[in-house]
Amino acid sequence: MSAATVENTAPMKAGNRIPLTRLISVELRKSYDTLAGRWLLIAIGAITATAVLIFFLTADSSDRTYGNFAGVTASPQAILLPVLGVLLITSEWSQRTALVTFTLAPNRGRVLISKIVAALILGVAAVLIANVFASIFTVIGGASDPWGSGSEVLEYGFAKFGLFQLIQIMWGVGFGLLLLNSAAAIVAFFAVPMVISIVSDLWSAMEDIGPWVDLGTSSQMLFDSDGMSSAEWQHLVVGVLIWLGIPIVIGTMRLFRSEVK
């Protein structure tokens, strides 16, 4: 009786790493795969349309301008986009799928980049949706000068409005990275800036510091019809560094050092 022989086989070669574009598409799909994410995206579109419709029904015809319609969409999106940014970052930890994610894509830096790019893409999409609604209602609004100058449309409709919304969604990304927990990050995002804003208004010692640390107020100045002064731009930049830069840096360090379970 002869023993069976096993042929020698060459070891399997590791496949190429997952392309970044595929990681980004996966992160975009995650934004609507879950029930919460799907309804959040629907809510962003529906509330944006509702806000524009309410303004259209209640405003005088002279106020139904493109700039006003675009501005009306800023508030509801500024509330919901940060929540979307938080969920994009914390989805693995909230659903306990981090081990699967980082086993399939071990390079945590590439996973993080794909999440940030996905957040920016969704932010740009929200800006485009808001501008579509604003444009439609501007056409039927009946204002004597609905569009203003072409530069005004580009400046307020796309440049400043787009910058404002990208700041909001990246603000949520920063809190999500810092805490890696959906509920805690969402609560902290709304509570901490609110407390700082109240303290800066009530405490005289904070009057000079407040504009530098209150990103909510400094980012709203993007919609000032008179334009922003150099000091206001400085306030905005410092606020972005404090509320986006610091949480993202600390959160990235935590992401790279944390144990995946």
Image (tube, grey):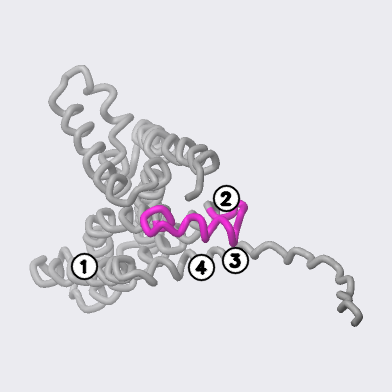
How far separated are the C-alphas under marks 1 and 3? 30 Å
Residue occupied by mark 4: 26
User: Would you say residue 177 is visible in this rendering?
Assistant: yes
Q: Is residue 35 left or right of residue 125?
A: left
How far separated are the C-alphas under marks 4 and 1? 26 Å
Residue occupied by mark 3: 21
Marking on residue 47: 1
Image quadrant assignment for residue 199: top left
* Element marked by disc 2: helix
Q: Amino acid at mark 1?
A: Ile
Q: Amino acid at mark 2?
A: Arg
How far separated are the C-alphas under marks 4 and 3? 9 Å
149 magenta-colored: no
Circles 2, 4 touching at the beta carbon (< 8 Å)? no
User: Would you say residue 226 is visible in this rendering?
Assistant: no
- Earlier in the chain: of badge 4 and badge 1, it is 4
* Element marked by disc 3: helix
